Image (cartoon, coloured by chain):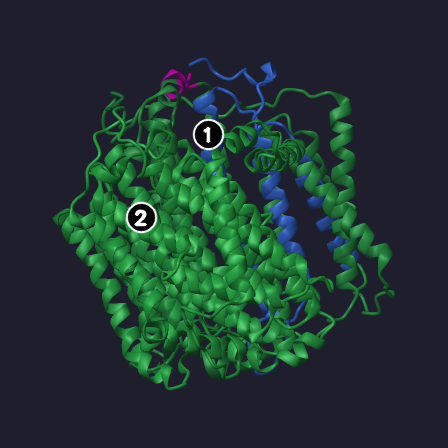
Chain colours: A blue, B green
Amino acid sequence: MEALLAAVIGLLTAAGIYMLLRKRTFPVIVGLALLSYAVNLFIFASGRVVAGLPPILAPDAAAYTDPLTQALVLTAIVISFGMSAVIVVLAIGAYLETGSDGIDMTDAPSDRDGPAA
Amino acid sequence: MSLALIVAIPFLGALLPGLMIRSGRNASALAAGFATALALLMLGLNAPAVLRGEVVQTRIEWLPQVGLDANFMLDGLGLMFAGLILGIGLLVILYARFYLAKTDPMGQFYSFLLLFQGAMTGIVLSDNILLLLIFWELTSLSSFLLIGYWKHLPEGRQGARMALAVTGMGGLAMIAGMLILGNIAGSYDLSVILQNGEAIRASEWYLPALILILLGCFTKSAQFPFHFWLPHAMAAPTPVSAYLHSATMVKAGIFLMARMWPVLAGTDAWFYIVATTGLVTMVLGAVVALFKYDLKGLLAFSTVSHLGFVTMLLGFGTQAAAVVAMFHILNHATFKAALFMSAGIIDHEAHTRDIRRLGGLRALMPISFVISAVAALSMAGVAPLNGFISKEMMLAEAWETAWLDNRWVIAALATLGATFSVAYSLRFIGHVFLGPVRSDYPHAPHDPGPGLWLSPGVLVLAVVLIGLMPMTTVGWLVDAAVADVTGADVYVSLYLWHGFTPALAMSLIAFAGGLGLLLLHGALSRAWDGAPRPEAKRIFDALVGAVRGGADALTRLLHNGSLTRAIAIAVIVILGGALAAFFGGNHAPGLRAGTPIAPLQALGFLLLAVVIVATVVLQANRVLSLVLVGVIGLMVSAIFVYLSAPDLALTQISVEVATVILMLLALNFLPKVSPPEALAVHLRDGVIAAAAGIGAGVLAYAILMRDFAFPSIAAYHLANSKTEGGGNNVVNVILVDFRGYDTFGEITVLGIAALVIYALTETILKGGPANDRLLAMDPQGRAGDRHPMMFVVVARLVLPVALMVGVFIFLRGHNLPGGGFIAGLVVAIALLMQYMASGLGWAEARQRTDQHGIIGAGVLIAAATGIGSWFAGVPFLTSNYAYVSLPPLETFELATASLFDLGVFLCVLGAVMLALASISRLGIRAGGTVSAAAFDINPSSPRTEEAR
């Protein structure tokens, strides 16, 4: 099971970085979302994972899973939403302002194909 | 406390002139003067104790963990310097009031001046070298502000930058040196370091520490080869030159050498570095000063020369030389500040400082003439003025000191320096005041009012009195200072007449030589101007230019404006670092027992892998890739469920919904497809991404297969969650209790993010090209029925249920999966559904509280909960709880943490709503229509109602 989780983290990282390397805003936003999943899972995994052990105190529980990484990841998930939202607005604003959804600050003509002002 | 107060008063006082300037220039100057006088008075109150030989101390713990404490001490050396700083400061404040023009912002000037004064007083009173370093840097910064005070003058700005660069770099070196020193002594307290002189000099780190500290001192005190910034700093207003660049700041380096004298002096390294540098600086400064045409330039190089004079004496390392050094610091401060002020008066009255355009001012400005002449004669070392005594004593010391066993080098060079010193001092008098009255002054000169000549007058009075009665006037102060410099009781005797000594002979030679040089000045000056010589400013500019060019080139290489390139570089560097660490270090195979793969897990993994790959492959179709991202998010929540993280699963699933809505909104405005890219680009990025993915995966696997290297603190949280936090859901207790302060920060960030989004959309809507494009957008591919009746009805039916679920999740959160974060998201989604179903217009019309308020209330409630702990006498955000039984309800728990969680809930709710609603508002402009009704089709009438 550990191998599968590690593979998921690897796949998500690869997909996220690949998308981050695109030259348009939207794929980069998608890439950040994918990378957030990967990072959250990675932090979560650093607490070592188990199935069927609660993070909730109970009198009959034999052992517990690591609650600390869960708390870390929980806030990370919410914050990454806030971050995505800000980037989305930046992307929309940049597209509307410049007429291009290119992400690089270069003047390559291929980036100038947005809606006419 | 009182010592800390002496330092604090100028800093606090710095606020006053800026405010008082509204009541006029006099009020501003008086406020500055009042603060200085108060500090001087408090210093005076401490003086008797210091003169009795005590060391006054004030100790305030600040950051004891790093050895940085606000410890102050006042001994004889500190008293002399602090008195100099505050006393001359008072005179400069008076002078500046009448010197500055009406158009100059005077409040700003006095504020900067007091900032500097506070920093300087801090240096001389610090008993902690780290604290001293802070004040040291502050003097560099305030000096920067003062040199660049006339912002419209390019020379001022350049001079300020140069001074900051040179003294700032020296300061950096000194920080390193001080840290080494503190490490050797085992303490950063000066009093401890001063006790450990032997150990420090014996340490193998002595030489590096010495060189680094001296770099700081030499740059600050304008010693060769760092002297060049001082003449350029003369672009500052003259009161600044008189104060910072002659009397006080440039003496900070000398102060530090004197302060560290018991620890660092007495070795060969000290003698050869310090004495030689001082000697070279003294001669060089004196020679250059003779050929300067600018009055302030002449005085600047003369200051360089005299600073070299004192440095050389400290370098000698003998007690007698230290006496002369301390005495000359006082003497130089008096006559040089007076000379600078005189130069300022001449500039003020004749509108030029160019010596070639002056001459014959004796009759026109008699008061200024007397003041300047006395001060300049003292600088030349003419009896019976104070400069004469210290120069005689210096020459006597030079006569006694051998350099590399050669007895003549220092004596001869010191005499040469004195010769040029006589020449330029007499030139100051001769070429400016004597000679025939001219008819071509830029402005008819006459003596200024007493406001301008009073300050230099007082200083010149001191020059004469110290010369006539050295023991009565300053003998006691020099005595106290020298006792602290040398760490021994030295018998200080200052006399005007020493008898027929070698020093007197040297002095006479210097005087005759100086007169001769002055007579030959015309010819010498022409030769000097014609001779090629290195221009320090050009070298400095070239150096700075080269550094800047290198930095620019490196930046352009890494950051050419392409995010793609920056990310690729970052990924490759991280990968390279990880590989190096992997192959460079030792590692053993993981021993942790893994869990076997169940068929269901394998199936889930395959599904997820396919979706991830599909997201990438189909990325050109943006809507499709967005749907796939949503699927990935759901599967990630499934992973969380499976791996015993119910809170995470709930959070992930609700965030996923909000994220998909967010991205759909984004796609509403952005292009729906990505343009194709070359195969080579895909391959290149694919290789980088695959390498990173493999790295991350392998690293995750390595971690998962190993046990914790150190005992995890999770056990602590599990053990204390119930007893201290009063909750069974450890994750929630960590969030709202153990790490409540972090959570407080995070909800604040979330709220700020939402406000940023609101502000950005407002900007887009404000008009301009962005808004034009928004208006021109073609609403394409819209559904005919934008608010389907089925959706509207179901959404409304679901609302109360969803709200109830939200409340339920919130309430159970402390003990069972749930809590403020998740409840906030759930309620936000329930409300967002109304927006989607019935439209923005309809929903906003029914919204009674605005989202900004909800965010603010959330943060405030969380903060108030934390502050409430203070009233119970416990630290911020310490939680408390009680069990309450209210029949007929079950016994339930009331915890302050729940109140905090309420803040979290409100903040999350408000932030999500505000973020999404703000972006939706863009849609109204983009050709959308707003319907106030819940449905596009009114079921009770056949007509379609649309309203704007």
Q: Are marks 2 and 1 in contact (CB under 8 Å)?
A: no
Q: Are marks 2 and 1 on the same chain?
A: no
Q: Amino acid at mark 2?
A: Ser
Residue appearing at x 57%, y 56% in the figure: B414
How far from the left and from the top, in percent, is residue B518? 46, 40
Q: Give the structural element (helix, strand or loop) at label 1.
A: helix
Residue appearing at x 77%, y 30% in the figure: B684
Q: Amino acid at mark 1?
A: Ile
The chain identifier of the residue carrying mark 1 reads A
How far from the left and from the top, in percent, is residue B584? 85, 57
Left or right: B300 in relation to B797: right
Q: Give the structural element (helix, strand or loop) at label 2.
A: helix
The residue nearer to you, when weighing B250 against B874, is B250
* Residue indicated by mark 1: A92
How far from the left and from the top, in percent, is residue B29? 20, 53
Rendered-image quadrant of the C terminus of chain A: top left
Is residue B776 inside the magenta stretch?
A: yes
Real-space CA distance between mark 2 and mark 1, rounded to the nearest whole angstrom: 70 Å
- Numbered range of the magenta stretch: B773-779
Q: Is residue B347 above or below residue B449?
A: above
Q: Residues within 10 Å of mark 1 (few under 14, many from 20)?
A: many
Left or right: B152 in relation to A40: left
Give the number of the disc on residue B536. Answer: none
Left or right: B740 in relation to B925: right
Q: Residues within 10 Å of mark 2 (few under 14, many from 20)?
A: many
The residue nearer to you, when weighing B260 against B15, is B260
Residue appearing at x 40%, y 86% in the figure: B54
How far from the left and from the top, in percent, is residue B5? 31, 72
Give the number of the disc on residue B372. Answer: 2
The residue nearer to you, when weighing B826 against B772, is B772
